[in-house]
Image: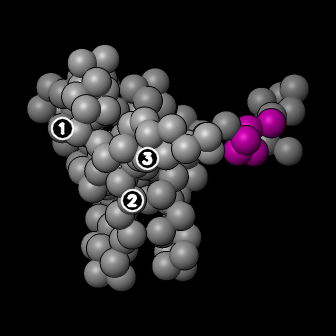
Amino acid sequence: MLLAVRQLEATSPARHDREGAGRRVLTQAQHRLTSAEVEQITAEYHAGEALRSIAVRWGINRETARLALKRAGAATRKHGEIEPSALKEARQLQDEGWSLNRLGAKFGIDPKTMKKRLSGEPKMGADTHTTHAGRRD
């Protein structure tokens, strides 16, 4: 990693700091997403793709992808949720022998969360309060 930084420093153009001394400064290349790219990201997200995997594939930060969806007016899932179609696919893959770790990686959620979704456990914060007789309020 350090070698890569030094190679980048060696190839970056010299910039002048406040004192006027020329030295190399690392700058991050910015890429503004086009409307076509935002549409593609939105389509991938609505197809059930995890925001994290979309960001990795596009080479952008996860927050950048989330903000692009927000600016496009796209409805977003809450953290750890999975689309019904993706959950159906996950169940099929689990039947084929996929591990929870592998499923979690594919769908971009924690393996423990994947286990809960596959078992049908209610999400945290859901109305799970029961009376002392075991009936829901």
Which of these two is toward me, 18 or 112? 18
Can you give x and y, in whole percent of width and height, for residue 36 in the image?
29, 81
Image point (35%, 63%), residue name: 31
Image point (29%, 42%), residue name: 12
Which of these two is toward me, 106 or 13? 13
Of mark 1 and mark 3, the one earlier in the sequence is: 3
Report the span colored magenta.
125-129
Furthest-left residue in view?
Answer: 96
Evaluate if marks 2 and 1 touch, with contact meaning CB atoms under 8 Å apart: no
Q: Amino acid at mark 2?
A: Gln
Is residue 44 visible to the viewer in this orientation of the structure?
yes
Can you give x and y, in whole percent of width and height, for residue 50 in the image?
37, 50
For the image shown, how many numbered marks are present on the structure?
3
Q: Amino acid at mark 3?
A: Arg
The residue carrying mark 3 is: 15
Where's the C terminus, which quadrant? top right
Badge nearest the viewer, 2 or 1:
2
Q: CA distance from mark 1 to mark 3?
A: 53 Å
